Amino acid sequence: MAKRKTKAAHTGHHGVLNPAVAIVVCVFALAMLGVSVLFSASLPIDINNPYQIIEKQMMWMGITFVSGLMVLKVNLEWARKFVWVGYAICVAGLVLVLIPGIGSVINGSRSWFRFGPFGLQIAEFAKIGLIFFLAHYFSLIRKESGTFWKGFVVPCLAIGLVVGLIMMQTDLGTALIISMVSFCVLYLAGTNVFYLVGSAIAGTIPVLFLISKDPERLSRLTAFLDMEGNKSGDSYQVWQAILAFGAGGIDGVGSGNGRQQLKSLPEAHTDFIFAIVGEELGLIATMTVVLVFMGLFLAGVSHVRKAPNTYQFLLASGCLLTISIQALVNLGVVTGSLPTTGLPLPFISYGGSNFLVMGLCVALILNTSFAWKSPALNDSKRKLKEI
């Protein structure tokens, strides 16, 4: 009997059902919305040069596009050889930025390296470095991910070092995002849930203690609990954002006709740009933004379910969670559902470092999408480090 020829097995999605297509469409829509809203949101910054912010954002979009194309060509399995080096570079950068004369202070946080008129926020790039580290590490100890020492203590030490250095920069918003994403990655990797819950409870106590000793942080927390009573103080930004949503109503006041960013709403082009979307374009636009982020997340979840191994599953999941959690926190802050943290809205807010990192996260997800379509290797040719 002649042997029946079997077609090589493939993983991933194909054609119009490929979640990568949905992800690209969602990101493109958000970026275009950001450009359209940024003009009026950034107008008060420099009336004599109203295109300044738009030009910089377009420049960063170009840099992100080129960088993303380069990431698409990278063999992610080959990149594992440099995970430890990448983690070490991130830690070294977080240390260097704390040194006066090397790091620069912007909005109260010493998180920036300045290169003339441009700056890079090293804490943003630490997000990707830590995701690579955790994905690679847990793929190597797959059978011991539920143990206390290798599955919990060692990765927590690696996370704690990065988060601790970022907190020393007083960039608590980025530290929060990294902590939340890392917590989720540990859970997905198989870390014992009791260890995670216990560490979350134990970590809350010193955080609350530190907040109680910092009058500014304590004032922000108490202001969040009574925004109307503190609308002239620490809740001023959030209160003005709520007024912007109210002024916009269902249909909005029209693109370019917003008034809150002219004199009332600080950081309208960065952390609170969602309020400008609500004022100028109305409830329909804000709900559309929420649905687009939800669509991006669901498409990403559909994609990571097809992951061929632990490493690529955690890598794609970590990138997806970084985008989704930051968007969720920003939307919560602007609508008054969460305390103010100072985080931009992915792909919409102005900010070069954050836009570049979010774009690289998308590129890594797309990279895995292309890699998972490749034919499976014969057993004799496989050289896998994990199951």
Image (cartoon, rainbow, N blue to C red):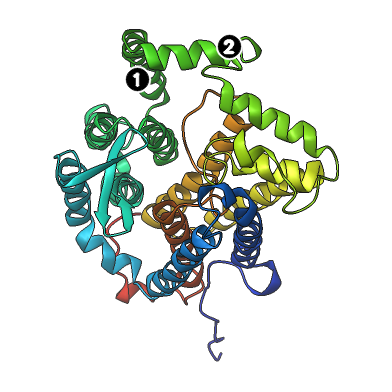
Q: Which residue is outermost to the front? A: 48
Image vertical order of residue 163 relative to residue 58, above or below: above
Which residue sits at x=49%, y=14%?
221
Image quarter in which the C terminus is found: bottom left
Residue 209 is left or right of residue 18, and the answer is: left
Whole-percent x, y for residue 262 in the image? 62, 41
Q: CA distance from mark 1 to mark 2?
A: 26 Å
Q: Secondary structure at mark 1?
A: helix
According to the picture, the residue beneath numbered tag 1 turns out to be: 199
According to the picture, the residue beneath numbered tag 2 turns out to be: 225
Whole-percent x, y for residue 97 in the image? 20, 43
Query: Front-most of 85 and 206?
Result: 206
Label 2 CA crowd tier, 10 Å (few <14, some 14–19, many 20+):
some
Image quarter in which the N terminus is found: bottom right
Which residue sits at x=64%, y=62%?
32
Looking at the image, can residue 201 be seen?
no
The image quadrant that residue 51 belongs to is: bottom right
Image vertical order of residue 164 relative to residue 80, above or below: above
Which residue sits at x=67%, y=43%?
276
Which residue sits at x=55%, y=81%?
7
Residue type indicated by callout 1: Ser
- Please state which of the two labelled residues, at mark 1 or mark 2, is closer to the viewer: 2
Residue type indicated by callout 2: Leu
The mark nearer the N terminus, 1 or 2, is 1
